[in-house]
Amino acid sequence: MAGRRLSSLDAAFLNVETPSAHMHVGFAAAFAPREGGLPPRFPQLLEHIGRRLCRAPRYRQMLAAVPLGLHHPVWVDDQRFDVSRHVVRSKAGRLRDAVEEAMSEPLPRDRPLWKIYIADRLEDGTLGVVGKAHHCMVDGVATVELASLLLDPEPDAADPPEDRWRPQAAPNGRELLGQAFVDRVREELELARLPARIASSPRRLLSLGGEVSGLLRAAADSLRPAVPVRALNEPISPHRHLAPVDRPLEDLLRIKRSFGVKLNDVVLAVAAGAVRRFLTERGEQPIKLKAMVPVNVRGGEDGELGNRISFMFIDLPCDEPDPARRLMDIHLATSERKDADEPRAADRILRSITYAPHTIQQLASRLIASPRTFNLVVSNIPGPRQPLYMAGCELQRAYPVVPIADNHSLAIGITTVRERACFGLYADRETLPDVDVLAAELDESVDELLDRSVEGTRPAALAGP
């Protein structure tokens, strides 16, 4: 029997992957060894991770393609699964070097689509762990959840019970083809029944006007063209670099409270200020940039992997010299989109692609990933607020890796680890070799807004009636 099938959005991340644009999401984490002790070595950590894979069954599944491409691939158990093919030792002496080693290569598709690199001899005495999983398998939120499956809430947690996993037999080509045909027929029937379901439900009919309005707004926002920028929207190489920025979370929360905005507004404003400074120093004219902002649409009880994200498209006012006005412009834009429920409308649009012919789905995937659709991604991924440990070592920092599509040289991610805000500026090493300069500009962009912040008050020039 065939396994769970990729959704259209999951499959889109397979479709847009190229030799230079690797569609994996991930993290780079630093762990502190026990006080007075040395970090555990690679063999111990390999065993530690292997024992906890029972918590994440998808980590032992691979993709099986459907003959003739009739439908999206399905997840099946890897008959030759071996954890040592997925957890490898890095000889890097710095965390950033381990990132470059791990993230500059695509994930092979003949096995489960994840890999962890362990740098157990970092120069600063910490333990480095770099993990990646293909975006068709998990989104950013699910990546954090899966990383947490390998961690424990206390340093001396007991090992899970003995793992008795055995792979289930993989479906043969005839079974894959038959289930794909059944799924296609079911989808066509659902599409055919949709007008009747709407007409038979008065409440549904009354709410249709508002939904259509939201759908039209979301579609128009998606199709509104971005202006490619030379520093950010050029052909890229396969080589990657991660520039980290580590700030107290309270810095961002203070700005949030002072201006009466959302934390995500602060993140976007900080990114806008950094890019403005960066472009100016390069002698380029700062302009408004269109950012793709992932939005989590998982339900509170949704434990499924795969992608449950939607998107907002927000103009970053990099042309605005005043940092407070940049923040308030962004707050107004995000509030308007959320009030109109655009993320949910965009989610419906993405789900509706399921019913389109396969070639149309592929074209839509490539259109969404085009530099004519957006200039860069800015993603805020909530992280753990409680202490977490790996083989007795406490998690100190974790920097997110947000993938970049072709002709996009930069993605900015942020996650929180307890009381720290960890920014990861993920860039093409060839096109954007000075991304560490941009990281320094982001640090200064936070300070710039902090200087304008007065706890509990909004700036007089920006205060409304």
Image (cartoon, helix red, strand yellow):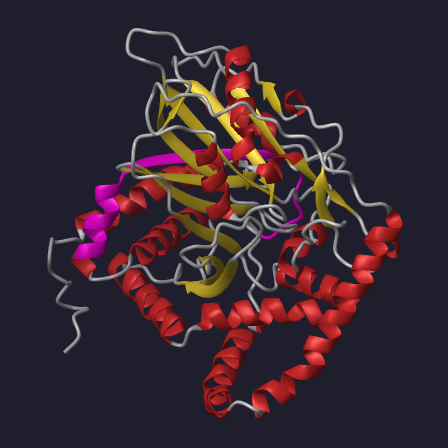
Vertical arrangement, residue 262 with respect to residue 379, above or below: below
Locate residue 218, reporting x and y percent: 51, 74
**Can residue 56 be seen here?**
yes
Locate residue 373, reporting x and y percent: 59, 64
Number of numbered discs visible in the structure rendering: 0
Q: Residue at horizontal 41%, vertical 25%?
A: 30
Which span of residues is magenta-colored?
A: 233-257
Vertical arrangement, residue 108 with respect to residue 275, above or below: above
Image quarter of residue 383: top left
**Which of 66 and 380 lies nearest the eye of the viewer?**
66
**Which of 282 and 45 lies nearest the eye of the viewer?**
45
Q: Residue at horizontal 46%, vertical 47%?
A: 141
**Can residue 358 be seen here?**
no
Vertical arrangement, residue 104 with respect to residue 279, above or below: above
Q: Residue at horizontal 64%, vertical 54%?
A: 10
User: Residue 239 in magenta?
Assistant: yes
User: Residue 19 in magenta?
Assistant: no
Q: Is residue 452 left or right of residue 210?
A: left
Image quarter of residue 154: top left
**Which of 352 and 380 lies nearest the eye of the viewer?**
352
Q: Is residue 281 left or right of residue 465?
A: right
Locate residue 86, reporting x and y percent: 63, 26
Give the quarter of the figure containing the C terminus: bottom left
Locate residue 458, reporting x and y percent: 15, 63
